[in-house]
Image: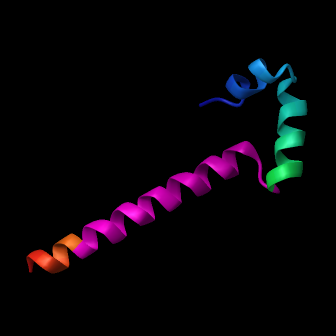
Amino acid sequence: MRVEEPANPSGLSVSAFHRHFRAITALSPLQFRKRIRLQEARSLLLANAGVAHLDG
């Protein structure tokens, strides 16, 4: 998802959206997206490690 996508429906310019997003999350939209993706990857790895352990 590009930064422009959530900015357009909100009626904000991209720079204003970026500023408000950072004020709320303390992260840029890109940093936030990377953090979410890493958390999802970590969860998948941990879930698969448990299955692999059960399978031997």
What type of secondary structure mainly makes up the magenta span?
helix
Residue at horizontal 68%, vertical 45%?
30
Residue at horizontal 41%, vertical 64%?
43
What is the number of callouts on the image?
Answer: 0
Display coloring: rainbow
Residue closer to the observer: 6 or 34: 6
Q: Is residue 33 magenta?
A: yes
> Where's residue 28, x and y in %?
77, 48
Residue 15, quarter of the rendered image: top right
Q: Is residue 29 magenta?
A: yes
Q: Is residue 9 above or below residue 32?
A: above
Is residue 19 rendered to the left or right of residue 46?
A: right
Residue at horizontal 9%, vertical 80%?
56
On-image quarter of the N terminus: top right
The furthest residue to the left: 56
> Where's residue 27, x and y in %?
77, 54
Residue closer to the observer: 31 or 47: 47
Residue 21, quarter of the rendered image: top right
Magenta residue span: 26-50
Q: Is residue 36 above or below residue 51?
A: above
> Where's residue 29, x and y in %?
72, 43
Q: Is residue 36 above or below residue 13?
A: below
